[in-house]
Image (cartoon, coloured by chain):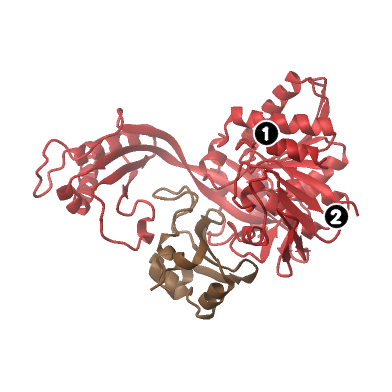
């Protein structure tokens, strides 16, 4: 069986990659260029708001290089989780980017867009049928969770991508997608082992993060054989080692041996990792267990309110000694100020130098720094409400007269004017559940587009 | 007394999805990995003490000899992006493990 070669340019479309690494990958005649486009790591805001965490100009640079190379080599280009979160507005932005590139370079190709958005009424029916289950430590889903979400997507697996390719797509642009699927579906369609292909996809979706030194914005090459795969970074300053690749299977996963996905559970208990040449690693023994119930992972977020925040520093030892009292009393004064009015908000402080990073998890109780940073974080039902509460809390803290105060001009050093930053809508995860399916391909509708000399026909 | 950061080459925390926080410790040598795991130093009681959590919030502790690594997963104290959250990626919750005396 001939080795199937996959070029993974970067960790996320828009993170960039060195041109020299990419050119080296193209020289190695890949059978596929694939790239992950998103993640839930940056938090719930992007899925809910429809905004992308990747920058359009940076995305266009990466997409242009990938698309031109794929067309020149006449190989498929598969993009997973378009636009960062893979809901309709994110995918639409990337369609716009690809349209521009096609026109500017008069490209001809067939593209299939696969949507990953789910209708609320469909999900409510599935909930009532008992087909939606919590994923990890989250509560059972409710009708309210579904109805209050702005966008709900599910991670597609290999099926929809294989269907698009088998129907002749040169470019597959996926909505929300299981990260390895963009890399694994094309070789699986050619008859390669699904366990090895998905494990290879798991490594390649992070590009050179699994190399040493690691980088989320440098290219990796994957080679899939009949009973093994090999990976090698394309930048000569990096290499893959058995340790770097085996350690990568731990990364951001709860259990490194059994990795569930839409096509089954990837079982890595029998894997071996060995050196392959100067800078590569060879892996065998990855298996896919398809015996369990098939599921797709649903993700949805809802608007929780609107945020206004104020950032300030303090470098006064007497103030720092009285910090707890000040923070508590400022909360009380702010509440008293709005008592009896129709106003509802959450006021939190983040104190850098004390427990800003870890909050309640912080084991150290003493402040040992000569200065602290305070973030006054207010979330209200409206932006106006958040603005009002933040302004009162900020001015109360600025002029709060604590016991033993020596510096009487003001307690806070504001680095910016205006001191209060209107951060807009705040989102939280409302849906993070598994939906039972009987094969997921039909759940992800696709749309075909044809470009001829840059024009869409 | 030696600290974990003296014998580990990687100590990291990271969200595993928005609701779980997972820690990886990767050792430099097989001897240190075996010494650490044979003494069962990383246990639910230790995580409860280091992170002020209760046992039911410890989701698992798994040894991964291929990488000379140990992984522990706990319930994220805040959902990613929740109001009052501190660390959206969960990537800066590892420090108490670095200073662990072994």
Q: Residue at x 79, y 44 (%)?
A: A161
Nearer-the-camera pick, A37 or A114? A37
Q: Nearer the viewer, residue A147 or A423?
A: A423
What hue represents chain B?
brown
Q: Secondary structure at mark 1?
A: helix
Chain of the residue that carries numbered disc 2 in the rendered image: A
Which element carries disc 2, helix, strand or loop? Answer: loop
Task: Classify the position of the C terminus of chain A by image quarter.
Answer: top right
Q: Position of residue A200 (x, y in %)?
A: 74, 54
The residue pinned by badge 2 equals: A192
Residue A28 horizontal side relative to residue A63, left or right: right
Q: Residue at x 43, y 34 (%)?
A: A424
Q: Quadrant of the N terminus of chain A?
A: bottom right
Q: Residue furthest right?
A: A1
Q: Are marks 2 and 1 in contact (CB under 8 Å)?
A: no
Q: Residue at x 57, y 41 (%)?
A: A47
């Amino acid at each position: 069986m001939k080795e199937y070669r996959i070029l993974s340019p970067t960790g996320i479309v828009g993170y960039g990659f060195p041109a020299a690494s990419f050119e080296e990958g193209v020289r190695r005649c890949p059978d596929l260029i694939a790239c992950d486009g998103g993640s839930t790591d940056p938090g719930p805001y992007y899925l809910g708001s429809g905004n992308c965490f990747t920058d359009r100009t940076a995305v266009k640079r990466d997409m242009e290089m990938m698309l031109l190379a794929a067309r020149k080599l006449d190989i498929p280009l598969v993009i997973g989780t378009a636009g960062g979160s893979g809901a309709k507005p994110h995918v639409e932005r990337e369609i716009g980017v690809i349209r521009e590139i096609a026109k500017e370079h008069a490209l001809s190709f067939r593209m299939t867009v696969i949507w990953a958005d789910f209708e609320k009424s469909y999900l409510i029916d599935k909930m009532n049928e008992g087909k939606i289950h919590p994923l990890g430590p989250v509560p059972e889903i409710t009708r309210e969770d579904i109805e209050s979400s702005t966008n709900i997507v599910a991670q597609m697996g290999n099926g929809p991508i294989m269907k698009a390719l088998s129907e002749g797509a040169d470019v597959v642009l996926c909505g929300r997608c299981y990260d390895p699927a963009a890399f694994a579906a094309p070789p699986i369609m050619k008859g390669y082992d699904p366990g090895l292909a998905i494990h290879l996809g798991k490594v390649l979706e992070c590009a050179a993060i699994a190399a040493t030194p690691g980088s989320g914005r440098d290219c990796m090459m994957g080679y899939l054989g009949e009973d093994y795969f090999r990976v090698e970074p394309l930048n000569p300053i990096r290499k893959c080692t058995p340790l770097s690749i085996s350690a990568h299977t731990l990364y951001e996963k709860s259990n490194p041996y059994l990795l569930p996905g839409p096509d089954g559970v990837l079982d890595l208990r029998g894997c071996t990792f060995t050196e392959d040449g100067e800078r590569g690693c060879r892996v065998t023994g990855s298996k896919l267990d398809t015996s369990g119930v098939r599921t797709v992972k649903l993700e949805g977020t809802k608007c929780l309110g609107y945020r206004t925040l104020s950032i300030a520093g303090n470098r006064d030892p007497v103030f720092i000694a009285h910090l707890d009292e000040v923070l508590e009393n400022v909360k009380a004064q702010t509440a008293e100020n709005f008592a009896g009015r129709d106003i509802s908000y959450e006021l939190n402080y983040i104190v850098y130098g004390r427990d800003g990073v870890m909050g309640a998890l912080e084991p150290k109780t003493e402040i040992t720094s000569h200065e602290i940073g305070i973030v006054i974080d207010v979330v209200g039902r409206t932006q106006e409400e958040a603005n009002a509460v933040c302004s009162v809390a900020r001015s109360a803290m600025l002029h709060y007269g604590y016991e033993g105060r020596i510096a009487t001009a003001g307690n806070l050093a504001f680095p910016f004017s205006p001191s209060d930053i209107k951060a807009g809508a705040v989102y939280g995860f409302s849906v993070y559940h598994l939906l039972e399916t009987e094969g997921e391909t039909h759940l992800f509708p696709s749309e075909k587009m044809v470009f001829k000399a840059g024009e869409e026909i | 007394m030696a600290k974990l950061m003296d014998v580990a080459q990687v100590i990291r925390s990271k969200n595993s999805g928005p609701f779980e926080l997972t820690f990886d410790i990767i050792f430099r040598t097989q001897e240190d990995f075996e010494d650490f795991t044979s003494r069962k130093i990383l246990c639910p009681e230790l995580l409860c003490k280091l992170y002020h959590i209760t046992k039911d919030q410890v989701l698992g502790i798994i040894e991964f000899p291929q990488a000379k690594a140990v992984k522990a997963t706990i319930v994220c104290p805040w959902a990613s992006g929740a109001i009052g959250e501190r660390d959206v990626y969960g990537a800066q919750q590892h420090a108490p493990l670095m200073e662990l005396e072994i």
